[in-house]
Amino acid sequence: MKTYMLWHGGGSYAIGTIPDDLEAFDTFSAAKEEFRRRGQDSDPYYPCVEDSSAWIFFAEPGSDPYPDMVLSFGPRGGVKVAR
């Protein structure tokens, strides 16, 4: 299922905007994996990322977006999915 993600890297990064920062993925799993990858300390492209989150959309969002799901990191480093 085509999935769109608006990623926010926490206090170190500006909040993304639609349509400029909206990313498209072929599946929800691919979007979730990319979110997990960006949150790892070992990723040199996104250093010092804390409190990151992502809005997930299952249809391309319009001008007044409301996410279908929100991704964040749990206390043990896993990806939390909230509806």
Image (spheres, rainbow, N blue to C red):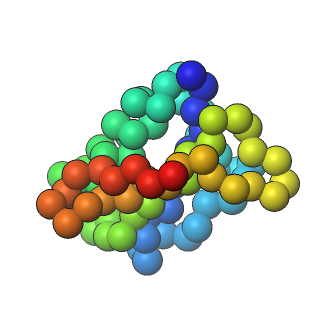
Tell me if 34 is positioned left or right of 21 in this view: left
Residue found at the far front of this picture: 83
The picture quadrant where one finds residue 48 is: bottom left
Residue 15 at x, y percent in the picture: 58, 67
| Residue appearing at x 40%, y 64% in the figure | 52
Residue 26 at x, y percent in the picture: 53, 22
Answer yes or no: is residue 46 visible: no
| Residue appearing at x 60%, y 47% in the figure | 68
Q: Is residue 35 positioned above or below 2 on the image?
A: below
| Residue appearing at x 82%, y 47% in the figure | 62
40 and 28: which is toward the camera: 28
Tell me if 34 is positioned left or right of 61 in this view: left
Residue found at the far bottom of this picture: 11
Tell me if 9 is positioned left or right of 77 in this view: right
Residue 63 at x, y percent in the picture: 84, 54
Answer yes or no: is residue 81 visible: yes
Q: Is residue 79 positioned above or below 60 on the image?
A: below
72 and 10: which is toward the camera: 72
46 and 39: which is toward the camera: 39
Question: Which quadrant of the rendered structure holds the N terminus?
Answer: top right
Residue 25 at x, y percent in the picture: 54, 29
| Residue appearing at x 74%, y 55% in the figure | 65
